[in-house]
Amino acid sequence: MNVPEMDFKMPVGLNGFLRGVTLAGALIVAAGLMWAPQRTWSSLLLAGYFLVCLGLAGVFFVATHYAAGAAWHVAFRRVPEAMTAILPYGAGILAAVFLFGSSLYPWTAEKAHGGFQAMWLNLPFFLSRAALYLTLWFLFARAIVRRSRLQDVTRAAMDTQKNARTSILFLVVFAVTFWLASFDWLMSLTPHWYSTIFGIYNFAGMFSSGLAVMILLVIWMRRAGPLRDFVNQEHLHDLGKLLFAFSTFWMYIWFSQYMLVWYANIPEETVYYVQRQHGFWLPLFILNFLLNWVVPFVVLLPTRTKRDAGILGKAALIVLLGRWLDIYLMTQPMSSGSAPRFGLWEIGAFTGACSLFVLIFLRAMRRALPVPMGDPMLAESLHYHN
């Protein structure tokens, strides 16, 4: 169907700038694969996982609200829907890492000694599981977003009900697959260390960073035009409350994992934290919970800051940087050794991934009306008050 473009004029040169940064990032990554392959593959793992998590946060946000029958978010629902468009690109980056950079995972070079771990951590099974996770996420996201956009034409309340059923099924599938994917893709970088709450920890980080990006995009779309007449301080206030809550939830899980490992003091469990608390890793270890919890907690505690777009946006940016650092600490120590490294190869992958996300988001926003005009709950969302 033909969908009119959204009423949004990009700043002159923005599209070209984003394409240029993305291309520069790709060229740096290509050079890095020749001159510093291990560092570059590690940086690509970080970038790909970061992008996939942003896409998953978008579909999780939409699915949760469909399943709950909530209406307050409808006015800006196109933003998290557009975030899901990054999923296949992030999946492509991860696929390249798993296929050609599998040397990041020590268990691929170790001789299997039998048992469940040897069965679970073998490359063909690992790749099959990754393909299954990514395919399921993409198909669910596509189905939910497609029906949401179709509703602009049908104006049928039944589309909302069908999406609610699809969303409930997605949430069940997501809970299992994301938990396992966190174990597979991140925890198995240190195959002899394990944590039963590692999946929940990653979920907390995934959703808090997704909320942070959503806040930044909603504020941008509100100032640029498409959402100016639809999003108000009430919506920002609730987004701020969610960011405040999930950054605190992240800290709760972070502390629970660290405290249990520290208290038990079992060598095979403490090995994960020993490296991250020595030398130049220690300042980053401390900065991690400052960015992900302390700063947003203090900033967003008053009601007025959650209703101020400027302050809320800055808090969201801090959480987003904290999430990048959190993934950095989960993925880089194994390849960086005794000291963290952040140079051309890391910068190229990170900036390229960020500019790619913005490009894909803008393209996805243009493929539908900026507001779901056919949703029967839109009126309730427009008159929403806390």
Image (cartoon, rainbow, N blue to C red):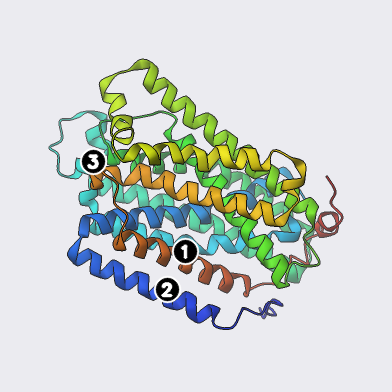
The residues bearing labels 1 and 3 have C-alpha atoms spaced at a distance of 28 Å
Q: Is residue 142 visible?
A: no
**Which image quadrant is residue 245 in?**
top right
Dot 1 or dot 2: first in sequence order is 2
The residues bearing labels 1 and 2 have C-alpha atoms spaced at a distance of 9 Å
Q: Is residue 103 above or below residue 369?
A: above
Q: Position of residue 277 (x, y in %)?
A: 33, 32
Q: Which residue is mark 2?
A: 21
Left or right of 85 on screen, residue 338 = left
Q: Position of residue 105 (x, y in %)?
A: 24, 45
The label on residue 338 is: 3
Neighbours of disc 2 within 10 Å: few (<14), some (14-19), many (20+):
some
Foreground residue, 59 or 326? 326
Dot 1 or dot 3: first in sequence order is 3
Is there CB contact under 8 Å for labels 1 and 2? yes
| Residue at screen point 83% across, 58% down | 382
